[in-house]
Structures are given as structure tokens and as C-alpha cells.
């Protein structure tokens, strides 16, 4: 299992992207799938940093881990920020898509689009930690 720990700061997003793309390359994930995975993880990591840490005046680290088997690449992000389940946010954002375009708010669909881009997404709250798990199937 490969791991990366970075401070919960926007400057860490570059290191996170490099980690994700390196892990995707190791398992032969194609460029399109690698991009979708990187985009999904970037969106969730950004939300953790901005809303989980900064807006709540907390500091902490993001812990990433990558595991693989013959059928999938799984990357998890763990943090000690305030509880936040992106799956609930995705459901709210999906209802926004049902509204006419002229009635929609600008922005706010990042989590929805990010989760749609991966093959599987899971969220767990374990003790005082959020765990976001992204899965991409291998060809």
C-alpha cells in the first residue's frame, strides 16, 4: 500500500494530484480514467481543506492511501475535519439538476460531478475521522 500525508492546505493539492496520477499510471489506468479520478479526488480534497479545516478554524492533515488488486485501484483520503458525507451533498446537487437552467445557482455541483466520474465512491465516518474512498475498475 502506497501512502501520502500532506497538510490540510491548498498548496498540498499539487502533491495529491501527483500521487493520484502516479498510482493510476502504475496500474495502467488510461488517461481519461486517470483524469476523472484525479478530478474527483481534487474536488473532495479541496472541500475538506476549505470547509472541513479552514471554515471551521481547524488544522489537520490529509492521509491518502492507494491499494490495488487485479480488478481495481482504490484511493482513500482520511481526515480529522468536521464530519461531512459527500454522498448527502451529491443527492442535494442532483435535485438542483432537475431545476430549469435559469433557476439554478452558479456552482455547487463539484461533488456531484466528481463522484459521477469514478466507478465507485464510499464515505465512512470512523471514530473522529472522515474516510472518502474512490474506486476505479481496471480493464
Image: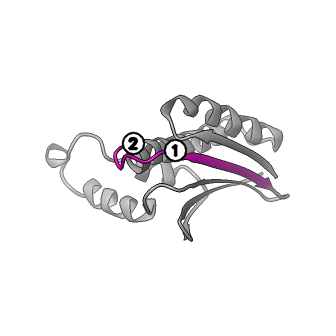
User: Between residues 93 and 49, which one lies in front from this camera angle?
Assistant: 49
Q: Is 22 on the left or on the right of 129, as rendered? A: right
Residue contact at pointers 1 and 2, CB within 8 angstroms: no
Q: Is 5 on the left or on the right of 55, as rendered? A: right
Magenta-colored span: 54-67
Within-10-Å neighbours for mark 2: few <14, some 14–19, many 20+:
some
Check residue 54 in the rendering and tell me which mark sits there, or answer none: 2
Q: Looking at the image, which residue is at 66% across and 39% down?
A: 34
Mark 1 or mark 2, which is nearer to you? 2
Instruction: Estimate the x, y position of residue 114 in percent, counting from the top left.
Output: 48, 48
Q: Looking at the image, which residue is at 78% across and 37% down?
A: 25
> Which residue is identified by label 1?
45
SS at badge 2: helix
Would you identify the image quadrant in which residue 121 lies?
bottom right
Instruction: Estimate the x, y position of residue 50 in percent, counting from the top left.
Output: 40, 42
User: Between residues 40 and 126, which one lies in front from this camera angle?
Assistant: 126
Instruction: Estimate the x, y position of residue 123 in percent, counting from the top left.
Output: 54, 65
Check residue 138 in the rendering and tell me which mark sits there, or answer none: none
User: Between residues 91 and 7, which one lies in front from this camera angle?
Assistant: 7
Instruction: Estimate the x, y position of residue 43 in percent, counting from the top left.
Output: 48, 43
Q: Is 93 on the left or on the right of 11, as rendered? A: left
The question of residue 59 being in magenta is answered with: yes
The question of residue 111 being in magenta is answered with: no
User: Between residues 109 and 139, which one lies in front from this camera angle?
Assistant: 109
Within-10-Å neighbours for mark 1: few <14, some 14–19, many 20+:
many
SS at badge 1: helix
Q: Outermost residue, left direction? A: 103
Amino acid at each position: 500500500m502506497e501512502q501520502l500525508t500532506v497538510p490540510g492546505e491548498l498548496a498540498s493539492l499539487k502533491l495529491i494530484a501527483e500521487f493520484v496520477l502516479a498510482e493510476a499510471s502504475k496500474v495502467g489506468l488510461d488517461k481519461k480514467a486517470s483524469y476523472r479520478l484525479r478530478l474527483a479526488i481534487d474536488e473532495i480534497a479541496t472541500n475538506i481543506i476549505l470547509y472541513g479545516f479552514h471554515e471551521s478554524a481547524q488544522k489537520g492533515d490529509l492521509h491518502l492511501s492507494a491499494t490495488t488488486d487485479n480488478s481495481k485501484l482504490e484511493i482513500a483520503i482520511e481526515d480529522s475535519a468536521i464530519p461531512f458525507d459527500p454522498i448527502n451533498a451529491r443527492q442535494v446537487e442532483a435535485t438542483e439538476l432537475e431545476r430549469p437552467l435559469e433557476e439554478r445557482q452558479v456552482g455547487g455541483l463539484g461533488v456531484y460531478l466528481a463522484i459521477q466520474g469514478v466507478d465507485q465512491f464510499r464515505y465512512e465516518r470512523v471514530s473522529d475521522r472522515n474516510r472518502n474512498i474512490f474506486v476505479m475498475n481496471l480493464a
